[in-house]
Image: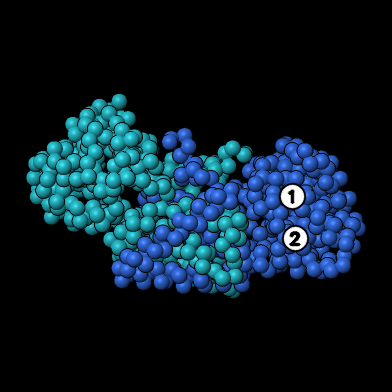
Chain colours: A cyan, B blue
Amino acid sequence: MPGVVYERAAVLGCGLIGSSLLRAMRARGVARTLAAADPSEAVRARLQALALADAVSADPLEAAGDADLVILAAPSMAIVEDAPAVAAAMKPGATLTDVGSVKGAVADAFAALPPSLHAVPGHPIAGTERSGPDAGFAELFDGRWTILTPLERPGDDAYALAVARLSAFWRALGSTVELMDARHHDLVLAVTSHLPHLIAYNIVGTAADLEQVQRAEVMKFSAGGFRDFTRIAASDPVMWRDVFLLNREAVLEVLGRFTEDLQALSRAIRWGEGDKLHDLFSRTREIRRGIVAAGQESPEPNFGRDRGKA
Amino acid sequence: MPGVVYERAAVLGCGLIGSSLLRAMRARGVARTLAAADPSEAVRARLQALALADAVSADPLEAAGDADLVILAAPSMAIVEDAPAVAAAMKPGATLTDVGSVKGAVADAFAALPPSLHAVPGHPIAGTERSGPDAGFAELFDGRWTILTPLERPGDDAYALAVARLSAFWRALGSTVELMDARHHDLVLAVTSHLPHLIAYNIVGTAADLEQVQRAEVMKFSAGGFRDFTRIAASDPVMWRDVFLLNREAVLEVLGRFTEDLQALSRAIRWGEGDKLHDLFSRTREIRRGIVAAGQESPEPNFGRDRGKA
C-alpha cells in the first residue's frame, strides 16, 4: 500500500469520476479524511447511502475549506467558473486540481489564481459511458494514463513539489502520470477522444433521422458495427457540450482533417478505386495492435463482449 | 437438438464466418456430412488440423458437387464471380446461399443462375474484427439476426420450400431469420454496418497521419474513445473493399447524410451553440438503450471490457 499522500482531500462534484476518486482514495488509503460536495440532493443522498466520504456537503466552499487537496470533478465549464471561489476558500499551500477533459481553458483559469495556492490542471484518461455516483468504481484509474499540465512557475520549488506530490497521488491510484503542455494536451485529446465522441454522436443522430430505414431496423441489425458507436454516444451530454465549447479550435482543426480524408475516401468509392480502399483498410490494423500492446485495450475479439459465448 | 436439416453441406471459403459455420453445423448436428473448400493451402492445413470438416478440398466445384446446401463464404466480389461455376457443378434441387455483406449484387448474380437450383442470398449479422479459420467459433450466430433476401420466384413452390428450409437451418444455429428485399437490405446495412466501418477506417487513418500528434500518443491516450473505433478498423481489408465497391450507391447516400449532419454540428461548435449540442447528445442515449433492450449489446459499461476490474 502506498500510504497517505494527503491528510484531507475534497472532491467537488461526485459523478462517475468524482465517486470513483472517493472509492479509489479510500481503497488505497491515500487520504486520511475524505470530504465530498455536490449540488444535487439526489447525488448527496447516494454518497451518504454508499458511505463514500467522511463528510458530504451541498457547499463546495465548506468541503474545500480545510482540505490539503481539492479536486474539481464537475463538467469542464463548471470547473472553470468555480475555480476562483473555491481557491479563495482554500488554505494557503494546499493543492487544487481538476479532472476535466479540456486543459487549456482550465490552465488559463488556474493561472489567474493566487500563487499561495498550488493549482495543477489534470486529466485522467479513463471513464465509461455511464454517469452518476453509482457508476463509479475504485479501479477506474488503474492501468490508465493521467495527464498533468502544470502552470509555468519557474523557480517556484514549492509548486514543483506540489506537482510531484500530485503525481504520487495518481500513481497511488494505479495511473501512469505524464506531464504535458496544456495546449498540446487539447490537440492530442481532440484526436483520441473529442473527435471520436463527435463522430459517434453524429452517426447515431444520422441513423436515427433517416426516413428510409426504421429505428427498429437500426437497433436490430446494429451488431454489424453501429452498436460500437452507440456506447460513447451515450456519454454525459453536459460534459460533452462543455468539451466542444471549450476546445473549439483543436476540435475544428482535427475535424477538418477528418472531413478532408473522408471526402477522398468517398471519391475512391465513387470511382471504384479498390486499391486505395484496400491500402487504407490494411494500414489501420497496425494501430489497434499497438493499442493492445500498450495495454490500453482488451486483446479479446469484440472487446470481450462475447466472452460468455466463445 | 434441432436435428439434421441438410444431408450434406459444403462451405466454400473458410475464414471467420465459414469456419464458424462448420463449427456451428457440427455442434448443432444440422448437417450429416461437411465439405469445406478454400484456395489457401495454409487455411486448408488449419481446417485439417482442427478437424472442422469431413472433406477438405482446394477445388470448390469438387466440394459443391454432391452437396444439398452450398454456402459461399468468401468476400463479396468472389461470391459474385464464383456463383455461376459453382451453380453449374451443383446437383438439381440443391440450395445455394451466401453470407456476404452486400445483397443486391449477389441477388443479381443469383437471378441469372438456372432455376433448377434454389439460390437464396443470405447475410448473418455477426462477426468479430478477427479473420481466418482460427478466429471462428460455434456460437457466433447465436442470438444474432440472419437476413435472407429470396429472389422473385412467383408460383415456384419448390423455391418457397427451399427458403423455408434455409430459414430453419439458420434458426438451428441460433439465429433469428428475417426476410427482406435485397436493395432494402443494402440500405439498412449501409447505415448499421458499412458507414460505421468507413468512418472507423477513416478516423484511424486521420489520426495516424497527423503531423502534430505522435502515433505513440494516439495509442497511449486512446482510452478516451479512439480505441473503440480501432476494433472495426481492424476488420478484413479485402472483405471491406468489396463491400464499398459493390454497395456504392447506398453507402454514398448515407455518407452524404452523415456529412451534412457533421457540417451542421461543426457549425454549432464554431458558433458556440451549446443548446444544439446538448440536444443531440441527449437524444442519442435512447438508441443505445433500445439496442441493449433488443439483446444486441452487452448491458455492461465499456462493453464489459473492464469486467475484471469493476
Marking on residue A32: none
The residue wearing badge 1 is B170
**What residue lies at 18% left-to-right and 41% top-to-bottom?**
A63
**What residue lies at 47% left-to-right and 34% top-to-bottom?**
B308
Q: Quadrant of residue A81?
A: bottom left
Q: Chain of mark 1?
A: B
User: Residue B246, how many percent across, how many down?
Assistant: 66, 67
Q: Nearer the viewer, residue B2 or B247?
A: B2
Tell me if I can see residue A65 in this picture: yes
Q: Chain of mark 2?
A: B
Tell me the quarter of the image containing the C terminus of chain B. top left
Q: Is residue A171 left or right of residue B118?
A: left
The residue wearing badge 2 is B121
Q: Is residue B185 above or below residue A124?
A: below
Q: What is the three-letter code of the residue carrying label 2? A: Pro
Q: Is residue A250 left or right of residue A85?
A: right
Between the C-alphas of marks 2 and 1, the distance is 13 Å
**What residue lies at 83% left-to-right and 46% top-to-bottom?**
B5
Give the mark nearer the N terminus: 2 vs 1.
2
Q: Is residue B256 left or right of residue A141?
A: right
Q: Nearer the viewer, residue A3 or B150?
A: B150
Mark 2 packing: few (<14 Cα in 10 Å), some, or many (20+)? many
User: Residue B145, how many percent across, how many down?
Assistant: 66, 53
User: Residue B144, how many percent across, how many down?
Assistant: 65, 49
Tell me if I can see residue B52 in this picture: no
Secondary structure type for disc 1 = helix
User: Residue B158, how many percent across, how many down?
Assistant: 88, 60
Mark 1 packing: few (<14 Cα in 10 Å), some, or many (20+)? many
